[in-house]
Image (spheres, rainbow, N blue to C red):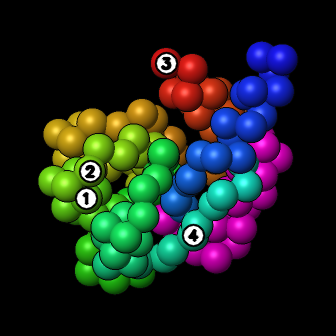
């Protein structure tokens, strides 16, 4: 019964993917679906992240730091966190320590460098939702 309840909870959780590269968006979505999540929204611009987060509630954001417009993922999350507390996992190909320091100011569940593996993403997400 406990396992069934866990599966039901995954269906109810809303996850936002903020990724500027369509192939990576689709890959992340596929990984989440493989984990049992189905309520997934994907965007590619910082302004879109802010917009959808003001209109809907999400349980988690997978956030690329570099997005398609002039609002990067860290700035988008800073603006969102003024209104809502949504956990975020940053995903980046840039290992610039300055970005990680900026991200730490607002907190995060995880900070992954690309390429993202299924097992690593799953471990961070499961650890977050268990707590």
Q: In which quarter of the view is residue 2 placed? A: top right
Side of 55 relative to 19 (left or right): left
Q: Is residue 21 above or below residue 53?
A: below
Local SS, label 3 = loop
The residue under label 3 is 131
Picture coordinates of residue 128, whole percent (x, y): 51, 27
Q: Circles 2 and 4: CB distance less than 8 Å?
A: no
Q: Which quadrant holds residue 48?
A: bottom left
Q: Could you tell me if the residues under marks 3 and 4 are in contact, i.e. CB atoms within 8 Å? A: no
Tell me the element at label 2.
Answer: loop
Residue closest to the eye, 96 or 13: 13
Label 2 – label 3 distance at C-alpha = 19 Å
Q: Residues within 10 Å of mark 3 (few under 14, many from 20)?
A: few
Q: Secondary structure at mark 4?
A: strand
Residue 76 point in image, percent of width and height: 27, 64
Q: Are marks 1 and 2 in contact (CB under 8 Å)?
A: yes
Would residue 11 be found to the left or right of residue 99 on screen?
Answer: right
In reply to whether residue 131 is colored magenta, the answer given is no
Q: Considering only vertical position in the picture, is 70 above or below 60?
A: below
Where residue 55 appears, x then y in whole percent? 37, 70
| Residue 126 horizontal/vertical position (percent) | 63, 27
Residue topped by disc 1? 80
Q: CA distance from mark 2 to mark 4?
A: 19 Å
Distance, label 1 to label 4, CA atoms, is 16 Å
The answer to the question of whether label 3 and label 1 lie on touching residues, with beta carbons closer than 8 A, is no
Q: Earlier in the sequence, mark 3 or mark 4?
A: 4
State which region is magenta.
18-36
Tell me, for residue 42, which label it has, or none.
Answer: 4
**In whole angstroms, how far apart are the C-alphas of marks 1 and 2?**
6 Å
Answer whether labels 1 and 4 touch (C-beta < 8 Å): no
């Amino acid at each position: 019964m406990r396992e069934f309840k866990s599966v039901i909870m995954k269906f109810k959780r809303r996850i936002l993917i903020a990724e500027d590269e369509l192939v990576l968006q689709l890959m992340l979505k596929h990984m989440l679906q493989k984990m049992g999540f189905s309520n997934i929204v994907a965007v590619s611009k910082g302004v879109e992240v802010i917009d959808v987060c003001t209109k809907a509630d999400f349980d988690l954001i997978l956030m690329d730091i570099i997005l398609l417009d002039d609002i990067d993922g860290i700035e988008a999350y800073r603006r969102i966190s003024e209104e809502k507390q949504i956990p975020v996992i940053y995903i980046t190909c840039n290992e610039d320590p300055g970005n990680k320091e900026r991200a730490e100011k607002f907190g995060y569940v995880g900070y992954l460098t690309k390429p993202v593996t299924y097992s690593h993403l799953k471990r961070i997400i499961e650890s977050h939702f268990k707590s």
